[in-house]
Amino acid sequence: MTGSIKPTTLDLLSRVLELEFGEPRFQHYGLFPAAAGSDIASTDALLPAQQRFTAQLQMLLARGGSGLNVLVVGDTLFHFAMDFAQKNYSTRWMGSKKLLDTRFNALDTIHYAGSDFVAYSERIAVDVVIHEGSIRYLDQMAILSKSRDLLGDLGQLIVFSEFIADDSRIGYSSLPNHSSFEQLSRRLGFAQLDSLDLSSSAQQTLRIVRPLLEKHGSTLMDEGYADSEVLSQLLAELDSMLSEFDSGRRVFYLKVLRRDLRQTSDWADAQFGDIRSFQPHEIAELFEKSFNVTFNEELWNWKYGLGNGKCVVARLDKQSGIVAHYGGAPRKICYFGKAAMAIQPCDVMVHPGVRKQYGKGSLFFEVAATFLEREIGNTVNHLLGFGFPNQKTMNISKRLGLYEKTDDFIEIVFPAGQSVSSQQQYSVVDYEPDNNASVEELNRLWVAMRADYSDGIIGVRDADYIRYRYVSHPFSKSKQYHCVLIRAVDTRQALAFAVLKQHGAGVLLMDLICPVAFMKQAITILNQSVSADTADSALRVWVTKSGQDKVLTEGAIVNELGIEIPCNSWNPGPSAELLYGAWWLTAGDMDFV
């Protein structure tokens, strides 16, 4: 019953079972007869059902014959590992050291292998890895990769886990998407031998355990295992899990995967990793060969360190350098008036030496699909993806079913500003990021702007974001960004915030934060200020085409940039039809300008 319950809750559930039965029981789901249906089985049926589940695991192991070398992972499988070792199988168990006892230490056939599966470094080849559920979706790539490394030729991975089966509606879950797990396992060179849907047994287990938690709640509080708030939260979580099982959103599977050496993919042995799997200097060669520019480690650390960036990388093997990278910069957004998260795919790179094709068998596709499954969609950390891909990448991604178009990015060039007496009502002054009063003014402007976008999508532009995006940006050291406030001369009220950047022979308006009704006036004021500072210096803005009417003034010229704004179409999420024309994006939303 590991589900999405916090790991520390396992001790609490174990104590509940001990109070009910006089001994701690297994902490995993039981296996109930299919005829049990929706009726709640008796409490006495729990232990036989759990024993039936471990017997199912033993039967799957027995198919491999005698003399197996087995690695068992997880606290819930401690007793299973002990029983298996007593049958003279060479067994390694991995889990909490506190569970070790004299019986364990007396057996020659079982060895303690530590508590961190992914960090396990002993050089061994095992025949079978059994991994307890449930897997969290961001851990599945590391678990599958480590299992593949440990398994010998045709070795098997047995895993039981809860999954999200219905991801058609928005709702975060720490569980992996079932179809994505199956795709990822194939991508990493596994063939599926068995996939047993045991969801009804999981429901039965929860229906038995939940009343026991209520029954023994006062004792748990008296003993200091939990307070009333913790108990209430756990009961609510069990109710949520049951509801998801009942609706078909959540499922529970026992899967047997085999290392498949017959995989025809050129990349079945590729080593996949995330942002934690490498140091920035390791990406430098790939970056420079891909973009023909010098790698800037400070800029990289700003984006992926300070900005909590995400990525998927690939190596041809453990000794290979990184040959592919698909990154993303997270962004808080307001999604039709509600707080949400988006991510901007960026730094998409495949080494020219392995860039054979861009089809569904390509390394580009394997890395891109893995990233999208991990990072973007209805049930994962980022609801939306957006970005500014070059036309080649956009065309390839649309053809492969990874992206769809939601808008175009255009440039508006304003004519030289003329000094008008009415503009003397306003002043343009420097923004002071360390001045509390200025910060409060900026936040008030953002709140007013946000209200105008309740029927669309906009990235959060509060003072914290502005500090990260412009004040902390490596470019700020060379004073490339000029952050200003437009004030009313008579009242000193801040009416707009803007970020300007020298761009070629002109000035690029990176960001503008103010109510929509004041945008054109703000641009007129900024344009006049730019023209007064530098003769013949044109003010320009890059903006989503659907938003041009908010900023287009008389005499301005609209230029196509040849950039389409994409959305994710690989993982279930809001449709391109819903998102089309909904974004407000400017140059400041780009990660590299």
Image (cartoon, rainbow, N blue to C red):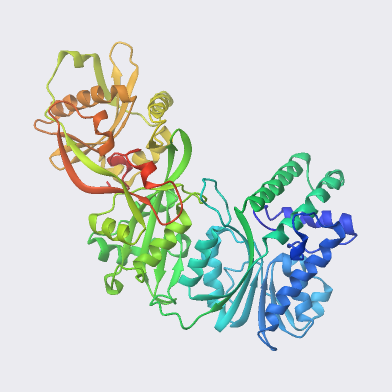
Query: What residue is shown at x 32% (from left), y 21% (from top)?
Result: 495
| Residue reaching furthest to the right | 22
219, 364: nearer the viewer: 364
Q: Residue at x 44, y 38 (%)?
A: 335
Residue 24 appears in view: no
Q: Position of residue 558 (x, y in %)?
A: 16, 37
Location of the N terminus by quadrant is bottom right
The image quadrant of residue 415 is: top left
Q: Nearer the viewer, residue 53 or 7?
A: 53
In screen coordinates, is 212 left or right of 332?
A: right
Using the image as rendered, state which of residue 396 and residue 524 is in the foreground. 396
| Residue 385 higher or lower than 313, as above or below | above
Q: Position of residue 74 (x, y in %)?
A: 68, 67
Instruction: Spot the residue most to the top.
Output: 490
What is the total number of numbered labels drawn onto the structure image?
Answer: 0
Q: Quadrant of residue 463?
A: top left
Residue at image location 28% in from the left, 34% down from the top: 547
Percent x, y for residue 76?
73, 65
The image shows residue 476 at horizontal and vertical percentages of: 30, 42
Indicate the quadrant where residue 113 lies: bottom right
Q: Residue at x 46, y 48 (%)?
A: 382
Q: Is residue 212 visible?
A: yes
Up-down relation of residue 277 to residue 215 (above or below):
below
